[in-house]
Image: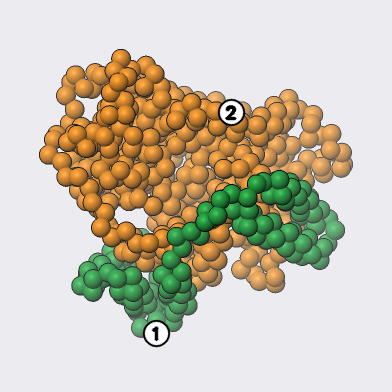
Chain colours: A green, B orange
Amino acid sequence: MKKYSNILNIFLIVFCFLYFYLAKQLPHKVAVYPFLITAILGVLTLVHIIQTFMKKEEGKGEGIFENFQGKQFLFVITSCFAYVFVVNVLGFFTATFIYLMITLVGLRVNKYIALITTIGFCIGVYFIFCSFLKVPLPKGFII
Amino acid sequence: MNDVVYGVIKALSITNLFAAFASVALGIIIGALPGLTAAMGVALLIPITFGMSPSTGLITLAGVYCGAIFGGSISAILINTPGTPAAAATVIEGYQLTLKGKAGKALGTAVIASFIGGILSSIPLYLFSPPLAKLALKFGPAEYFWLSIFGLTIIAGVSSKSIIKGLISGALGLMLSTIGMDPMLGVPRFTFGSPYLISGLPITATLIGLFSMSQVLILAEEKIVSGRKFVDFEDKVMLSKDEIKKIMPTCLRSTVIGSIIGILPGAGATIASFIGYNEAKRFSKNKDEFGKGAIEGVAGAEAANNAVTGGSLIPTLTLGIPGESVTAVLLGGLIIQGLQPGPDLFTVHGKITYTFFAGFIVVNIFMLILGLFGSKIFARISLVPDNILIPLIFSLCTVGSYAINNQLADVWIMFAFGIFGYFVRKLDLNPAAIVLALILGPIGETGLRRALILSHGSIGILFSSVISKVLILLSIFSLFSPFLMERMQRSGD
């Protein structure tokens, strides 16, 4: 766990410096409040660093990524990214159909259940957002 | 008084009744599905409510909130897994009853206790909200500054596993809140030249990313559980008169506990349910039954966690300080509807607010009906495996974040905050504190800068009024309150 506290410390330090650097580009009167927040986060980060140093290392194997399913996680996040990327190109319903089918089958859902779920979901979204709420959904060159 | 009567009549309109019914059903499903939380459900529903009238939208959000808190008990009782953290105490007695073949009784107790807790918590909501909101009329810029500090310290301190990490989350949220136009001088800050960011981060997309997409990633990293099984039951869900009589004192006691804990910003339903359970055990004449399947134990936990719903709405609506993470998200829904917490909600927007209050009662009545007659169906829905939920939730995140402004940029913001939210949760930071800072940040900043302009730069103005002094003391107290809460929870355990 100490390892992850150190990662958090590094992230916070980098974030503080980056924010401070960007705040410095602002006119003085506008930058005062951001500087104040940087100082607050800086102090809190310092306290967290001290806490991390004082904390005893806990037992091996105990970690926040202990049962992490790497391949599955990567597959889900990649398919999500691709979905957002193409939703405006293919149109919401086409992109959703492809995304749901690929992800469901990829996550080992039975093909027929995946197909029924996908069609049911698309119909549900159409009725709630298009018919009932009249919300326009991303339109691409298909639908 | 007119607004109160108007609210009751309006809440009973067909549209609002339908919204309450559907949202409670949806909330119960979300709560019953292990891994999904009430905050996630409310965040996902915000875009849908945007297209509704403000009162219908708020009733819908309240329906999901109350339904999800009760729904958590279904999987707690039937599959020994709390659907939401608030149902953790229900598992202790609820699953023991299931093993004894009394799952129906356990569910019946849970739904009746939840109903009593929820509906009675509307009394303090009606009684205490207007006077507390009037107090906000006396607030000047300095008081608003301290109010936002108080809100942040309390949610950062109490709702987080570590006070320092809670405060760090709040500070990160404050930084994110500075993106956009400077509130006093109109100069763009941290927008990287993009006109899209001039009005700041889109609150709905940020909320959906932090609470809903991050949940998708949390589910995706774990081994898929596809064969969840629950114990089928044949006994009646309805309780006998004697059984209702037996649980009634526990329900009333837990309602008081839950309402008080709800009003205290930051404490939340999980703590309330453990204290409610513990007090049920302490006052019970049948202490030996506890741990082996006592219906009073289920009643104690469920009445307390549902009583939190009404109580936690009080500081949220009057002062803009959410009682827990779900109400932090709900506050976002309120702001999207163009409503600002405070006295205006009870004067200018009185009709909307009192319709919401009456709708809150209706929601609890539907929760009772659906719980008594639909628990078996909801229990079956709770078996939907994560591999089906993951892509469906993400698709809803996408359509939800797009729906508010019809901009794909909002979807990318949701995506970015989903990944950020995933790491926030993995590193034990507090997403609720980040969201609250995003909402309270501009209020605090404007308050501070206006106060300093009024006093020509003298910081004395920040400490001059009685209200400011009280808020400073409360902020200091809230920083130390986690130690108190820890002791309370330990005694509950």
Residue A84 in view here: no
The residue indicated by pointer 2 is B484
Q: Does residue B306 lie above or below B392 as drawn?
A: above
Q: Give the SS element for disc 2.
A: helix
Q: From where the camera sits, is residue B286 visible?
A: yes
**B412 relative position to B141: left or right:** left
The residue closer to the viewer here, A133 or A14, is A14
Contact between marks 2 and 1 (CB within 8 A): the answer is no
Amino acid at pointer 1: Phe
Q: How many marks?
A: 2
Q: Chain of mark 2?
A: B
Residue A31, image x, y percentages: 80, 57
For residue B402, above or below residue B31? below
Q: Residue at x 25, y 19 (%)?
A: B246
Residue under the point 29% across and 18% down: B286
Mark 2 → mark 1, Cα distance in angstroms:
59 Å
Q: Quadrant of residue B94?
A: top left
Q: Farthest top residue? A: B285
Q: Which residue is mark 1?
A: A141
Rendering coords of residue B60 (x, y %): 37, 47
Viewer-side residue, B54 vs B369:
B369
Q: Name the amino acid type tagged 2.
A: Leu
Pinpoint the chain carrying mark 1: A
Does dot 1 land on a helix, a strand or a loop?
A: loop
In this view of the protein, which residue sits in the foreground, B442 or A130? Answer: B442
Choose top left, top right, bottom left or bottom right for residue B479.
top right
Q: Position of residue B488 (x, y in %)?
A: 52, 27
B367 over A73 or under it: above or below: above
Residue A88 position within the rendered picture, expressed as x and y whole percent measured from the top left = 45, 78
Q: Residues within 10 Å of mark 2 (few under 14, many from 20)?
A: few
